[in-house]
Image (cartoon, rainbow, N blue to C red):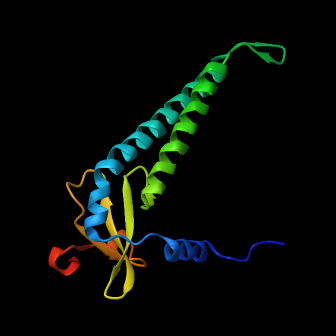
């Protein structure tokens, strides 16, 4: 029997069970989080390069009947290793407790409480510090500047 839950319900359940962070706790994760995000971005970029190389080798291979004489086995092994590296790194990021929103941008959120309801503390790779928050339903477009005194 098919599962009738929607993706939105699944996300909502995950948010309800997510660790709650204070602003100070979220900021304290940045030294560990930033290099992990950069690593997974680098691995993803390399995956795309290796995939393109595999396709190029396959297209340029010569044929002898049905057999293609272009060995992509080493590249495929490299691809598997990169995929394993990405899974491991994403697992480490998830263990921190952040919600990954966009790997390419390095966009992550921490679930926090504000005025008695759950919100996201928001940060994007390249920002000097965590300085934004938004309502869960508002998304990135609804980001508001953090006034530290309101988060004490």
Count of labels in the image:
0
The quarter of the picture where the C terminus appears is: bottom left
Residue 144 drawn at (x, y percent): 25, 75
In the foreground, 93 or 25: 25
Residue drawn 38% across the image and 77% down it: 138
Q: In the drawing, does residue 94 fall left or right of residue 133?
A: right
Residue drawn 26% across the image and 61% down it: 27
Residue 109 drawn at (x, y percent): 38, 65
In the foreground, 97 or 87: 97
Q: In the drawing, does residue 109 fall left or right of residue 151?
A: right
Tell me: residue 121, above or below residue 31.
below
User: Taking the image as drawn, is residue 72 in sight?
Assistant: no
Q: In which quarter of the image is residue 77?
A: top right
Tell me: residue 58, above or below residue 81.
above
Q: In the drawing, does residue 117 fall left or right of residue 48?
A: left
Residue 113 drawn at (x, y percent): 35, 80
Residue drawn 56% across the image and 76% down it: 13
Residue that protrudes farthest toward the bottom in the picture: 116
Residue 137 drawn at (x, y percent): 43, 79
In the foreground, 104 or 96: 96
Q: Quadrant of residue 39?
A: top left
Residue drawn 37% across the image and 52% down it: 106
User: Taking the image as drawn, is residue 34 in sight?
Assistant: yes
The quarter of the picture where the N terminus appears is: bottom right
């Amino acid at each position: 029997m098919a599962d009738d839950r929607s993706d939105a319900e699944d996300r909502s359940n995950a948010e309800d069970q997510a660790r709650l962070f204070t602003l100070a706790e979220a900021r304290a994760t940045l030294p560990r989080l930033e290099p992990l995000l950069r690593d997974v971005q680098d691995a993803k970029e390399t995956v795309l390069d290796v995939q393109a190389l595999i396709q190029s080798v396959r297209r340029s291979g010569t044929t002898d009947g049905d057999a293609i004489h272009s060995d992509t086995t080493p590249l495929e092994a490299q691809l598997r290793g990169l995929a394993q590296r990405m899974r491991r790194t994403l697992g480490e990021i998830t263990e921190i407790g952040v919600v990954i929103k966009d790997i390419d941008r390095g966009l992550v959120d921490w679930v926090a409480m504000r005025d008695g309801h759950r919100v996201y503390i928001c940060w994007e790779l390249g920002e000097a510090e965590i300085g934004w928050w938004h309502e869960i339903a508002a998304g990135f477009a609804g980001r508001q500047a953090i006034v530290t005194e309101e988060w004490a």
